[in-house]
Image (cartoon, helix red, strand yellow):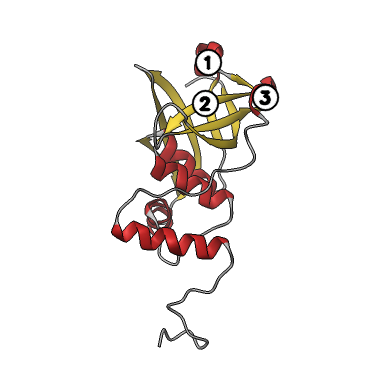
Amino acid sequence: MGELVELKVGGLLPDGNNQGSHILLLKIPQKSSYLPIWIGPAEASSIAMVLRGQAFERPLTHDLLQHTIEGLGATVQRVVITTIQDDTFYARIFLERGEEIISIDARPSDCVALAVRVRCPIFCSAELLESQSDHLVEVDEIEAEIAGPPPVQLPKGSADDALRKLMRQVERGEKDPREDDEGTGE
């Protein structure tokens, strides 16, 4: 895999050209620039919630993945963005269980969503960064747009509308109307 460069989550931006898509910006410390990766709305919401310190009462998909890994006695050692083929990035999750290191193929968006939950390092191969040098975004070009993670946006639908309303209530610090003062829901 060669030399690895550690990246940090620099922010998320909605993609103005593609409804629902977001751009995950991974900060490259040595170059004062970002590696942009286009991701879907579910993964963007998952990452944004962790960055904002928000959580649902029940586990979301990436929470489930984290709990499954931990329940099987493994820990996430690191995630690595390894290559790009036909404009699609590829990545791997490295798990440690005892003396064994397990490498699992995954999408970079899922890797980052897991990494921000377990607080493990995010790496990219130096060779891949070099190959993407024409596509990197300079810090000064984009910092004004990065005011933190975007609001969590959910797809439209009846069940999602109720969830969206609940999310707004949580963001405003309102009490869940399904709970009474004793927390019994009655």
Left or right: 85 as drawn, with respect to 172? left
Quick check: 38 above or below 72?
above
Q: Nearer the viewer, residue 179 or 33?
A: 179
Label 2 environment density (alpha carbons within 10 Å; few <14, some 14–19, many ≥20):
many
Residue behind mark 3: 139
Q: Nearer the viewer, residue 156 or 107?
A: 156
Three-letter amino acid code of the residue under disc 3: Val
Residue behind mark 2: 36
**Extreme residue in the left direction:** 158
Quick check: 7 above or below 83?
below
Q: Earlier in the sequence, mark 1 or mark 2?
A: 2
- x and y, in percent, of residue 82 in the image: 44, 25
- x and y, in percent, of residue 97 in the image: 43, 49
**Do the numbered discs 1 and 2 sit on residues whose CB atoms are within 8 Å?**
yes
Residue behind mark 1: 135
**Do the numbered discs 3 and 1 sit on residues whose CB atoms are within 8 Å?**
no
Q: Earlier in the sequence, mark 3 or mark 2?
A: 2
Q: CA distance from mark 3 to mark 1?
A: 13 Å
Quick check: 177 above or below 107?
below
State the count of labels.
3
Three-letter amino acid code of the residue under disc 1: His
Q: Is residue 164 visible?
A: yes
Q: Is residue 99 visible?
A: no
Quick check: 9 above or below 125?
below
